[in-house]
Amino acid sequence: MAAEAGSATKPAKDRGRWWRGFTGSLAAGLTVLAVGVLVVGLVCLFTGAPGPGAASLVGHPLAAVLALAAQRVADRRVGLPAAGGGVAVVLFAAATAAVFWLG
């Protein structure tokens, strides 16, 4: 009987797992991108080469921090707050791509 009760609740948890995995990947990707932009900025600072501008050096880490905070909400809550946190992560990633990479 315990196995039946456990299997009845499992689909409810699996339903949002792919979404949290997707948004978690986006948040982690933004974090890696922010670290990469900062490293390139430091290399360009020391070599005298032109590098990313101030907006990029501030915007990428800011977007990563906001996405990680939203992902934390998505991971720790259920229902509408969790979905909202995931949507926020997607919006932060899309805004970062649109502002800094697409033109």
Image (cartoon, rainbow, N blue to C red):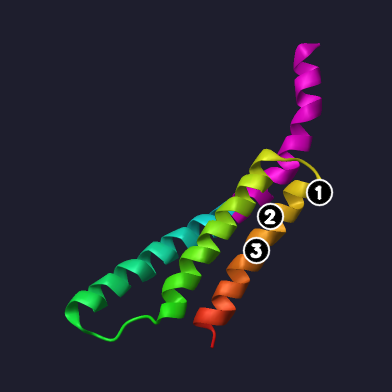
- Amino acid type, callout 3: Val
Looking at the image, which residue is at 72% across and 40% down? 77
What percent of the width, then of the height, locates residue 29?
49, 60
| Residues drawn in magenta | 1-23
Amino acid at the residue labelled 2: Gly
| Picture coordinates of residue 7, whole percent (x, y) | 76, 25
In the current view of this chain or complex, which residue is farthest to the left?
A: 47
Point out residue 64 in the picture as x, y percentages from the top left corner: 51, 61
What residue did someone put label 2 on? 86
Mark 1: amino acid? Leu
Q: Quadrant of the N terminus?
A: top right
Could you say which quadrant of the image residue 94 lies in? bottom right
Alpha carbons under labels 3 and 1: distance apart? 15 Å
Is 93 displayed left or right of 85 in the figure?
left
Q: Are marks 2 and 3 in contact (CB under 8 Å)?
A: yes
- Disc 3 crowd rating (10 Å Cα; few below 14, some 14-19, many 20+) is many
Give the side of residue 76 with respect to residue 53, left or right. Answer: right
